[in-house]
Image (cartoon, helix red, strand yellow):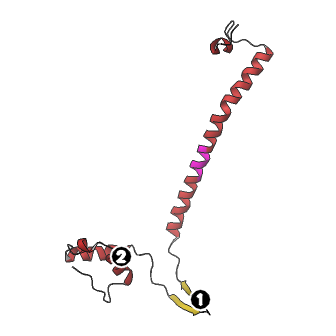
Amino acid sequence: MTIKIDQYTDAFTHHVYQQIDPKVRVTFTPSQVTAIENAIRASRPYQKHPIDMRGVIPLYFLRVYFVLLMGRDKRSQTRNKEEFRRKKAAMGSALASMYAVICMMLPVLLLVLYTIKAVVGIDFFEGIHLSDFLGWGY
C-alpha cells in the first residue's frame, strides 16, 4: 500500500510515512494507512498560522533563510506543564543536595560533639568510652 500526496496529505505526513521500512510499509492495509495518517496529523509539530512568511536572502557566497510566524498562543498548557516539571526537578535536586550535605556533615558534627564532651569531662556511661570500642584503650 502506498501513500498518495494529495490535497489531504501534507508533506510532513508523507515524510514520516516514508521513514517506515518499505518492507513493513507494503504490508499495511488501507485502514492502517488511514489510521497512521490521522495519528501523524494529530501530532504534527506545527499548525497553520495566520501570518506565515518564509523566504531566502541570497548573499554573495551565502544564502540565508528567514521565517516569520505569527498567530494565537496555544502553548500555555504545555508551558505550565514544563514549568511544573522544572520546579519538581529543582526541588528533587535541592533535596538530594541537602541530604548529601547532611550525610557529609553528620560524622564531623558527632566527632566535634564527642570531643567537646571529652574535654569538658562529661561521662554519660561511667567506665565506657569510645576508645574502648575502637581498640584505643590502654
Element under disc 2: helix
Which kind of residue does numbered mark 1 sit on? Leu
As drawn, 132 above or below 73: above
**Residue plotted at (40% across, 75% down):** 44
The crowd level at tag 1 (other Cα within 10 Å; few <14, some 14-19, many 20+) is few
Q: Quadrant of residue 56?
A: bottom right
Label 2 vs 1, first from the N-terminus: 2
> How many badges with numbers are in the image?
2
Mark 2 or 1: the one toward you: 1
Q: Provide the secondary structure element on which disc 1 rests.
A: loop
| Residue 91 covered by magenta stretch | yes
Residue 88 percent across, percent down from the top left:
55, 53
Question: Label 2, on which residue?
Answer: 16
Give the numbered dot on residue 1.
none
Is residue 93 positioned above or below 124 on the image?
A: below
Q: Magenta includes 123? A: no
Residue 36: quadrant of the picture: bottom left
**Most frequent secondary structure within the magenta stretch:** helix
Left or right, 138 with respect to 51, comes to right
Q: Do the numbered discs 2 and 1 sit on residues whose CB atoms are within 8 Å?
A: no
Q: Which residues are magenta?
A: 90-96
Circle 2 crowding by C-alpha within 10 Å: few under 14, some 14–19, many from 20:
few
Q: Position of residue 103 (x, y in %)?
A: 62, 35
Task: Give the left or right position of residue 25, taking residue 19 as reference.
Answer: left
For the residues labelled 2 and 1, the Cα–Cα distance comes to 30 Å
Residue highlighted by disc 1: 62
Question: Residue at 59% of width from left, 44% of height from top?
Answer: 96
Q: Residue at x 33, y 84 (%)?
A: 9
The residue located at (75%, 21%) in the rendering is 115
Quarter of the picture containing the C terminus is: top right
Q: In the image shown, does 46 or 56 lie closer to the viewer?
A: 56
